[in-house]
Image: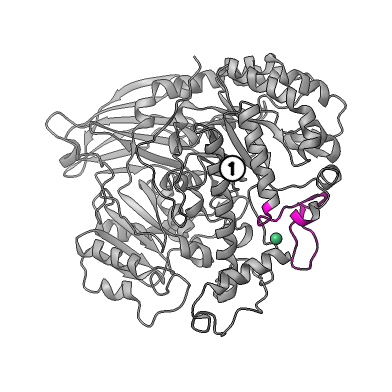
Amino acid sequence: MIRRILITLSFICATFVLGTNEPAAPKAAIDPLECCWTFGNHEPVSMYHRAGKRVTGGIEGSALWLEDWHGWFDSEASTKLMQELGLNMLHSRFYKGMGWQFESRDFPNVKRFVENCHKHNIRALAYVQFSTLYYETMLAEIPDLADWASVDENGNKRTYHGAYYRWLPCYNSPAFEAYLKKMISIALNEGSFDGIMFDNCDAPACYCPRCVTLFREYLAREQNPEHKFGIPTVAHVQPPPPQRPEYGEIKDPIYQQWILFRCERVTSLYRRLYQHTKSCKPTAIFSGNIQNIRRANMAGRDSLNMADLADCFDIFVSQSGNAPGITGGCIINRVRELKLARALGTPILALCDEDAGVTAEAEAKYILPLMEDTVFGGIPTDRTVIKPDRKMVSPELVAFRRPLLRRFNETVRAGREGLAATGYAPVQLLYSNESMLFSEQAHHAVLSAEEILLRNHVPFALLPASAAKPLAIPADCEVLLVCDQRCLSEAEVDTLVQFARRGGKLIVTGESGAYDPLYRQRRDNPLVKGLENCSSAICRSTADLAPIKSAAWTIKVAAPENGGKRLMADLAKTWSPILRIQAPAIVFAEVKRNDKKFYVHLVNYAGEPVARGIRIEFSEKDFGTPECTFAAPMENKPATSIIAKGIDTGWREIELPAFTEYAVVNIEAGHKVKLPAASRGTSRQ
Ligand SMILES: [Zn+2]
């Protein structure tokens, strides 16, 4: 049965977007468990042919059969197949950046495809390329196109990953913005698309004269430049060249402003495009590929500040190399991206460029990302089943995936109660925006703490914090970790101190609080000082670090030193969990709950099955003698009861059978015990 997408809009109140006077258009409410995304044919034939070489989908760009394939794709054959497979959302080709005068020739075919999508209950978002001006075609339409182009620090036009025929745009070009708005209007008003998907939303620094002037105007807002930058006037400041190292500890005040300026300009551009989309069609979905949202230095490198962008997109598309599995001792996963998106209240399509194929190992490789999405809150995706093929669609691939998708859809349908339950996150990890902007050490510390919590199966969530906004610590946060988050505002520090003084458990490591939001050193650390003699807080000057092999396209974090024992010992000192999960490090757990039950979802990242013997322990005070069931629905193992045995004083445990990729344990408290109420999201502060 095909799962329907429920997209509703809440008009309860018109909120105001921080920093603008425009009311924020309400975000589309999207339930990831109702979605299964696939890739439409999102590139025009001309893109392939102009490239010639192997490009999107691993296809020879110059292949002579691509027109035939496009013809097949635009017919009802493709959309009918998608519906049969349970795929119900996609992005479709619409505008690649070659100029509408040229690309509109293909528009009748695109419109026909969108109609076919709707006939088969599939939502179609219009692909709009942000990062390219194909000047070879576009100059005929826009003679002054050069004025729209981005310029590097040497005055040369930037190109898209070195493709000499694709200029990058300047994100401060008003004419470029107007053109994008025109494309949005056409897609939604004439093309009957259900929304927009901007691709390649990253924006490397532009040094064109317009950007230099705007940057100086931005700096001139500062009333006391001598105090802030050490110089009495900013009139002759030049935008800083790229820094080496690219990230590191960013303390040059003008370079900091260069980052903040670019992020502000790019965020406000996307906010206007979002508003324009909603003004064309209030129900439209606005999404964008903002790259791996957990990549190091996204602000400095690509002018993208995730903390602010959540207001500008209905869906984050986060593209990375984080195809789940084990590589060189690192457990590659997208849990970090999914947890940040959840904390920012934005659904996420986390693409990981995995093409499992139909090999012997393919089944586990295919199921793992689907289940990771489903468990941790992403939109499940089959990227490649409808990819271009000389037979139009690969019969082998379809035959291989059809039963897997059927089983997956059935797993989600039958397990919906436990998958849709509220995340249980007694432990929270502070994710300070300014620390992420300016400190690689702070980024490293968060990646490391997450690795320790994931490998030790501690249920946790990220708690985003921004100097410009009040920090609200959720009422269900039992322990808050502040791991080397250096750049905190006085208000943030006050909130943390008050939290601990009122009995909240707080673990503070590294140089957290030692600097202000602009990474300027304080005379005394107000966080450490405020927590002196506070029995519910632990402060130590060393942070917990795991070896980071990569924090870029793919995030690779190796096993933490000593298994993260020091942080786990600090947790044990301050906090008594009500359940404990004893499992191999390569199994990640996500715990969800409602007022009646807990659901422990387990995802195995190893290529081989997990042996019998994972144990879940419960405190008798909270669970009594619980009723437990175990299921591995992707392996056709339905829910069966497991008896909880008494172990140490006050604790019971269950032992789980073996499973391959995914298992779920439902836990209902014994008759005489009432579980602590599930949080309704109220704030302690
Ligand atoms: Zn520019």
352 with respect to 339 (left or right): right
Residue at 81% across, 38% down: 54
The spot of residue 404 in percent (x, y) is: 55, 21
Residue labelled with disc 1: 288
Q: Can residue 207 be seen in the rendering of this structure?
A: no
Specify start and end residues of the magenta stretch as a single range.
Answer: 147-174
54 or 601: nearer the viewer: 54
Placement of 391 over or under 352, stated as above or below: above
- Was residue 162 drawn as part of the magenta stretch in this picture? yes
Kindly indicate the quadrant of the structure image that contains residue 544.
bottom left
572 with respect to 74 (left or right): left
Residue at 41% across, 50% down: 16
157 or 675: nearer the viewer: 157
Residue at 38% across, 73% down: 541
The spot of residue 569 in percent (x, y) is: 32, 59
The spot of residue 226 in percent (x, y) is: 52, 84
Kindly indicate the quadrant of the structure image that contains residue 574.
bottom left
Residue type indicated by callout 1: Gly
The spot of residue 224 in percent (x, y) is: 49, 81
Q: Can residue 240 be seen in the rendering of this structure?
A: yes
Ligand 1 quadrant?
bottom right
Q: Secondary structure at mark 1?
A: strand
**What secondary structure predominates along the stretch shown in magenta?**
loop
Instruction: Give the farthest residue toward the left.
Output: 672
Kindly indicate the quadrant of the structure image that contains residue 67.
top right
Q: Quadrant of the C terminus?
A: bottom left
148 or 623: nearer the viewer: 148
Q: In this figure, what is the number of numbered marks?
A: 1
